[in-house]
Amino acid sequence: MGRWWTILPLLWLACTPEPTDPAAFAAILYPADNPSTAAGVALGERLFFDPILSADSTISCASCHQPGRAFSDGLPLSIGIDGLAGNRNTPGLTNVGYYHLPLFWDGRATNLEEQALHPVGTAHEMGGSWPEVIGHLSGTEDYPHWFLEAFGTSDIDSTLVGRALAQYQRTLVSRDSKYDRVLRGEASYTSAEALGHALFFDLGDDPGGDHAGLPTAECAHCHTPPHFTNQRFENNGLDEAPDLDAFPDAGRGAVSGNPFDNGKFRTPGLRNVALTAPYMHDGRFATLEEVIDHYDSGGRYAENRSANVHALGLSPGQKAALVAFLHTLTDTSFVGSRQDFRRRRAGAGSE
Amino acid sequence: MKNLLLFLLLPLLLTTGCLDDDDQLDPLREGELALAYRAEYGGQPLDIQRKVYGYPTGDSLKVLLFQYYVSDLELLPADGGESIRLEEIDLIRRRSAAGDPTVERTYLVPAGDYRGLRFGLGVKPELNAMNPSKFAANYVLNEAEFWGPTTRYVFAKIEANAMLEDDGRFDTGLSYHMGSDALYTTVTLDRRFTVGSGRTPRLTVVADVLKALSGNGETFDITAPGKQTVHGGNQDVAVGIWNRLATQFALRVE
């Protein structure tokens, strides 16, 4: 014990934060009152795919958030129980656990725990009520046991359902797109993808760089890596609004009560965007080509349209290059493994 | 016995060993200092989106965003002693029409006489070289104020929509994003004040958007299409805005 000071480096090590997320992402901020556990994630996964959460046991979260579509549904506006149409497009859920700012197109839910409480009681989604759903879950043979494993109680309530669903959704992590692999030096872009990358990140701005003189598409101001969203509310010029009350959907303004927020929506993340058509909060664009045409035009007038949305003057080749770059954000390993899960479940169900 | 001593000391070492720089002041903390960052346009409190402002070219505009990073904010003791660091990095941002033009901070600082304060405008080079993913997702350097996937923080932004024809439409976007190691500038604001003995001075750092765009006999020409979007690499175009921004800061003491 003479050389007690040899322990000092260890102390130093103990103070260095652990490299939990070696990829290019800042770590997920797990809430203190809902740390993820294996049992919690497994329970959340069961709940997510189980129609028991809807009034007539026909709709699960996964009916609208389908793994094969990066957890979106392919429809312009979502369709819920009894074929009722919703008023917004279903967003994909890739890397949703990394968002630490409010969720939904208009930011009306603070976090995943709270968000999960919404669909169950929403008439055009799952159409039920919490007391009813808790009754169903408690009446099954397995769920009380699974809740006991996950949370130490078989006394099921909506808070615990929300927590389990949140834990599961925090596992929907994609970090193996071509974009990631190029960053890690494991792959390289085609020339079209490289051009699209340069347009997306405004590399033309650098007078001494390889892309000097290229138009700047300004995308990364809002679709900021690594998740391709700044998580902020922006007006990207979808609707002409001579005055601020003219937007068909007030978006953020309806939540904040601030008229200058009318027509603003949260910038969606673009990971797996090639799988989540159609696009925008109302699904108005069927293809990525239409999205790029929109940005190229500079969009429509409103006094709160972002100053970073303006006519771009892209050539047909440059537009195609941007689309090619957006396709590099697709992660087939993410989608593939989730599809396997669905198949496993389908198999289990028919047993 | 030695073992026991070590055993007793270990928890202490573990806790004190992990303190970060902000805690260095601990034994000296004696007085409260209120520091406000106030944004103005032409000497009036800056109203995001709500107000129409005149511009020297004869046009008018509505400001959507005004923000800047501050590095190594320090108080300068009057006796010439070592400066007192209040903050390593901070982002002062105005972007909401519902927001206040003033951003407030409070610090506990050693009592004494001071001759002013000093900060670096922008993200200091050692931080500017760091990948945002190294920081917590909600850290001030993870505010999506960078372009690429690795470094290059945007030190300051001014965004506005201008009306260039007299048609009631604020349809010309102005977007000035500035920042690079070469532009990083130290700002020193001289003003005497005293902390302690019952005094809690209130300092206000004032930044004026109009003075950044137009001042010292120069006016940035917002009507020239090539000067409406200045981002990233073409810093030359915005260097005048940056220099005016860096030199127009004023310190008020109440």
Image: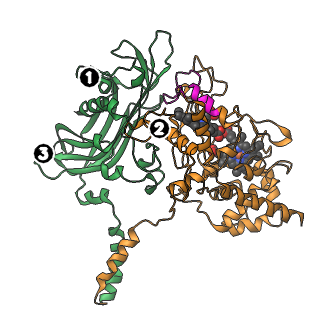
Pinpoint residue A254: horizontal percent, then vertical percent: 61, 30
Mark 1 or 3, closer to the camera: 1
Residue A227, above or below B201:
below
Q: Residue at x 30, y 85 (%)?
A: A4
> Colour in which chain B is shown?
green
* Dominant secondary-structure state across the stretch colored magenta: loop
Whether residue B188 is visible, yes or no, is yes
Between marks 1 and 3, how big is the CA–CA gap?
Answer: 31 Å
Q: Nearer the viewer, residue B118 or B12?
A: B118
Pinpoint residue A256: horizontal percent, then vertical percent: 56, 33
Q: Which span is picked out in magenta?
A: A291-313
Q: Nearer the viewer, residue B19 or A147?
A: B19
Tags 3 and 2 both on a single chain: no
In the rendered structure, which amino acid carries the disc numbered 2?
A: Asp
For mark 2, give the secondary structure.
Answer: loop
Pinpoint residue B215: horizontal percent, then vertical percent: 26, 22
Residue A191, above or below A152:
above
Which residue is labeled 3 in the image? B78
Q: Nearer the viewer, residue B180 or A327?
A: A327
Q: Chain of mark 2?
A: A
Q: Residue at x 35, y 78 (%)?
A: B10
Which residue is labeled 1 in the image? B215
